[in-house]
Structures are given as structure tokens and as C-alpha cells.
């Protein structure tokens, strides 16, 4: 914990240090300096500023160390950090540095383009973490493609599925997130270099060439229309981080649900003292899933701020832009932390296949009611079959009997004669539909994206 910021307990304890570094104070300042350096270099190449001045600017920036807090006083006074940054760069430097640094640019040009560099690094880091989680889920889905369990709708048992099929749905969602990361990157990681009012007037007729050259130097997208107040690209990148957190939360909630004592179908990796209680010695709480849920809940709460930041007016926002300074780094750090924790859960997840099979019978075999209905439908029609099986199911519950017993004893003989044996018809493992194809498709799609 440092003296500059509060102790953010979730992120400081469970966050991703690599992502924290991407959005650290030092990395942010270095990104601004990289933009200033690239502008000077591009302008010198195009003859807008003297080559010697560009060399002096490059040398000064390459050797300059700006300690934490060095910009604070000027930042508070002006409301933006770049004026103070320029003063620090120009102090005790050759005269041409101050004379030609920041030529034709404006504060938001530097900060937006610096943020684009950080978003590129942040998206790269998210892609690494999404890939790690996807690989774990792909292996988990493959290993359990035939592990039969109860599918649940509205919190109740519905029809049989397999744990591999459940994980395949997680994997497919993560595959789409990987696609979105790659698709959003060029829109979010663009150069902003259009000057004070977005017209590039200060830089003159070569402004477009400078902008394209800066984009080439920095490896960012070049655009021909200013986006000082058009924050849709940043909002997309921010929402993407939040939805990745949301994907992790959905996985974590299912793990926590299935880890409940009365269900006990999965457990988080168990090591000595993990998830312990201060008063209940027996507890092994799904603590990493809880961490993910906490991070994702915080991420979701930031989305109204992202939308508010899109509401800037005219050629420059009046306070809306500042929202991004805190919210964007927070969302990316939360997404990275959620991915790291979810990957740890998936990596050591204990799958209790015996308990899954046991739980299939907890509702007296009624999980096979749809299978019975579909088997009867050719003889009596789907609607009549539904009514018939509904009545049989109600009888089973009311009388505390198993569905198999009700079918064997109470189903009219002429209908029973048209059905397979109860052992075959009411076997959950025989009513899992396309689960094998679902797992295969999800894994194949993932592997294709990874390649």
C-alpha cells in the first residue's frame, strides 16, 4: 500500500500486477512522453520543425526520469497534467526543446493518444489472460464431455446435460470475447492529434501527414476525423472490459452454486486453510469465485460513468472526459483480476462426477419427464403427451414415488407397450442430445481463434 492511493483490497490482493503496471502513474507519464517524442520525430521528418530540435527533444525524453508526484502541483493548478509535464521536460534542457516541443498539439491530443497506447497494452494483456482461461476451459470441456449432470433452469433441475457441455457454453462466450478484443483494438487504439478545436489549424497543411506518421511510429490507428468528444471507441473498450468481467462472474456464480454443500458437484482447489472461516473450522468457502463476483460487481457499477463520459458537447467536453481517467484503468484492472482468479478456479477445479450422477435422482427421476413426453408424443400428440406426463409427475411428487415406478405401474398398458423399457427410456445418460457435438464445436472454434 502506498501513500498516494487508498488500499484497494480486492485489486491489491487479487489483481494482476502486469495490468496494474500498464495503468500505473509511471506508465501513464511515459505514454505521454512517447507521444510527444513521436510528434517531434514525425514533424522533423516532414520539415515542420528543425531536425536538431527533434533530436534534442528525443534525447531529453529518453533520459528524463519523472518521480511520482512531480506533476501533482501543476496538475491541481491547471486541471490537466500536460502543462506541468512540458515545464518539467523543458527545464534545464537545450533551448530548442522548449521552443519546438508540443508543436501544434493540445493537451487532450497527448492524453488521448497516451491512453490509446495504454489501451493497446491493456488489450494485449487481456488477450493473454483470456487465452489462458480459454485453454483451461477447453481442456475441462473435453475431459468432461460425457460427465452427466443435471441441467438447471430457474434454479431447478430441468433435463440432463454434461459438465463438458456446460463448460462449452462458457468457452464459446469467452471465444466471442476474444473476437471482440481483436475487433475493438483498432477503434480504441487510435491517434488523437487535431489540435485545440479539432481542426488541426495550428499544425498547418501537413497535419494529416504528421498524424499518419505518428500513428506509424507508435503502432496506432490513424484517423482523419477528431474524436475529442466522440468517446464511443473508449466506451466500447470499457464495456468490453466490463463484459469480460461479467463472463468471469457468470462462471464464478455457477461454480459457487454447484459447490453448495447440498449439491457438492464441484469444488474450488482445496489447499490447507484456503477459504477458511475464523470461527467455523469445517469451512472451505469458494473464495476465488467470491473474489471474481466482487470484482465483476464493481466493474458493472462503472458502466453508467462510461456512458456519461460519452455526453461531452461541442468540440471539447466539460468534465465528462475526466471520468475516463479513473474508470478506464479501473475496468481493465478489474477484468484482468477476474480473469486471473477464474483461471485459477478452472485450473484446479474438482469435479465430483459421482455426486452429479447421484443428484440426477434427487427429484425422483422427474428430470426425465421431457424424455418420457417426447417418447409418448408420436402416439398421442405432443400436447396430450405433455398433459399425461404432467399428471404422472404430479402423482410421483404427491405420493413420494419415483417417476420410473409411476411409469411402470400407472401408465396405460397400450401406451407402455409402445415405449422402450423404463431402464432405457429414463436413463439420463441416454438423453443428453447434442452435447458431444456442442463440446466439439466449442473446442474447435476456440482452437481456431487461438491459432
Image (spheres, rainbow, N blue to C red):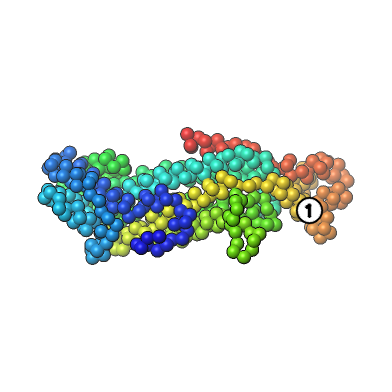
Relative to 125, say whether 76 is above or below: below
Q: Residues within 10 Å of mark 1 (few under 14, many from 20)?
A: some
- The residue that appears at 22% across and 58% down in the rendered structure is 84
- For residue 34, above or below residue 306: above
- Is residue 291 visible in the rendered image? The answer is yes
Where residue 444 sits, quadrant-wise, is top right
Residue at screen point 50% across, 42% down: 132
Q: Is residue 345 left or right of residue 183?
A: right
> Which quadrant does the N terminus fall into?
bottom left
Q: Secondary structure at mark 1?
A: loop
* x 20%, y 44%: residue: 58
Nearer-the-camera pick, 79 or 46: 79
Q: Nearer the viewer, residue 283 or 104?
A: 283
- Percent across and percent down for residue 16 are 44, 51
Indicate the position of residue 222 as horizontal and vertical percent values: 29, 43
The percent coordinates of residue 436 (x first, y second) are 64, 38
**Circle count:** 1
- On screen, residue 136 versus residue 99, left or right, reads right
- 428 lies above or below 74: above
Q: Can you give x and y, in whole percent of width and height, for residue 260 in the image?
A: 65, 57
Question: Which residue sits furthest front?
Answer: 272
Q: Which residue is mark 1?
A: 364
Residue at figure coordinates x 78%, y 43% from the top left: 425
Task: Decide if residue 350 is on the left or right side of residue 46.
Answer: right
From this viewpoint, is residue 172 visible?
no
Amino acid at each position: 500500500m502506498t501513500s498516494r492511493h487508498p488500499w484497494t483490497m480486492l485489486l491489491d490482493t487479487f489483481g494482476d500486477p502486469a495490468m496494474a503496471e500498464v495503468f500505473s502513474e509511471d506508465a501513464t507519464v511515459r505514454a505521454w512522453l512517447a507521444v510527444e517524442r513521436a510528434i517531434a520525430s514525425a514533424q522533423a521528418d516532414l520539415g515542420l520543425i528543425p531536425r536538431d530540435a527533434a533530436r534534442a527533444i528525443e534525447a531529453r525524453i529518453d533520459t528524463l526520469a519523472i518521480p511520482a508526484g512531480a506533476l501533482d502541483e501543476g496538475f491541481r493548478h491547471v486541471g490537466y497534467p500536460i502543462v506541468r509535464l512540458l515545464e518539467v521536460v523543458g527545464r534545464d534542457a537545450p533551448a530548442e526543446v522548449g521552443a519546438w516541443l508540443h508543436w501544434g498539439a493540445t493537451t487532450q491530443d497527448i492524453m488521448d493518444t497516451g491512453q490509446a497506447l495504454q489501451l493497446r497494452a491493456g488489450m494485449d494483456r487481456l488477450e493473454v489472460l483470456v487465452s489462458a482461461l480459454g485453454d483451461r476451459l477447453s481442456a475441462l470441456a473435453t475431459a468432461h464431455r460425457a460427465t452427466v449432470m443435471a441441467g438447471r433452469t430457474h434454479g431447478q433441475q430441468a433435463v440432463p446435460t454434461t459438465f463438458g457441455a456446460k463448460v462449452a457454453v462458457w468457452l464459446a462466450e469467452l471465444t466471442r470475447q476474444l473476437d471482440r478484443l481483436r475487433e475493438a483494438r483498432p477503434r480504441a487504439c487510435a491517434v488523437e492529434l487535431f489540435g485545440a478545436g479539432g481542426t488541426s489549424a495550428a499544425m498547418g497543411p501537413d497535419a494529416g501527414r504528421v498524424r499518419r506518421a505518428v500513428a506509424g511510429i507508435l503502432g496506432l490507428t490513424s484517423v482523419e476525423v477528431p474524436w475529442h468528444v466522440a468517446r464511443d471507441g473508449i466506451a466500447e473498450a470499457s464495456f468490453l472490459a466490463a463484459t469480460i468481467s461479467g463472463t468471469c462472474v457468470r462462471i464464478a456464480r455457477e461454480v459457487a452454486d454447484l459447490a453448495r454443500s447440498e449439491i457438492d458437484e464441484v469444488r474450488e482447489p482445496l489447499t490447507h486453510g484456503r477459504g477458511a472461516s475464523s470461527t467455523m473450522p469445517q469451512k472451505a468457502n469458494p473464495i476465488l469465485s467470491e473474489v471474481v463476483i466482487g470484482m465483476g460487481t464493481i466493474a458493472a457499477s462503472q458502466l453508467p460513468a462510461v456512458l456519461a463520459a460519452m455526453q461531452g458537447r461541442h468540440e471539447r467536453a466539460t468534465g465528462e472526459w475526466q471520468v475516463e481517467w479513473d474508470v478506464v484503468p479501473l475496468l481493465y484492472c478489474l477484468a484482468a483480476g477476474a480473469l486471473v482468479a477464474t483461471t485459477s478456479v478452472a485450473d484446479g477445479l474438482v469435479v465430483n462426477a459421482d455426486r452429479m450422477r447421484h443428484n440426477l435422482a434427487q427429484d425422483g427421476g422427474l428430470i426425465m419427464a421431457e424424455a418420457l413426453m417426447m417418447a409418448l408424443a408420436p402416439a398421442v400428440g405432443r400436447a396430450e403427451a405433455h398433459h399425461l406426463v404432467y399428471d404422472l409427475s404430479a402423482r410421483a411428487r404427491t405420493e413420494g414415488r419415483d417417476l420410473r415406478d409411476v411409469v411402470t405401474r400407472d401408465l396405460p398398458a397400450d401406451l407402455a407397450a409402445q415405449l422402450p423399457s423404463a431402464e432405457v427410456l429414463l436413463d439420463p445418460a441416454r438423453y443428453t442430445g447434442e452435447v458431444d457435438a456442442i463440446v466439439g464445436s466449442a473446442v474447435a472454434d476456440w482452437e481456431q481463434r487461438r491459432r
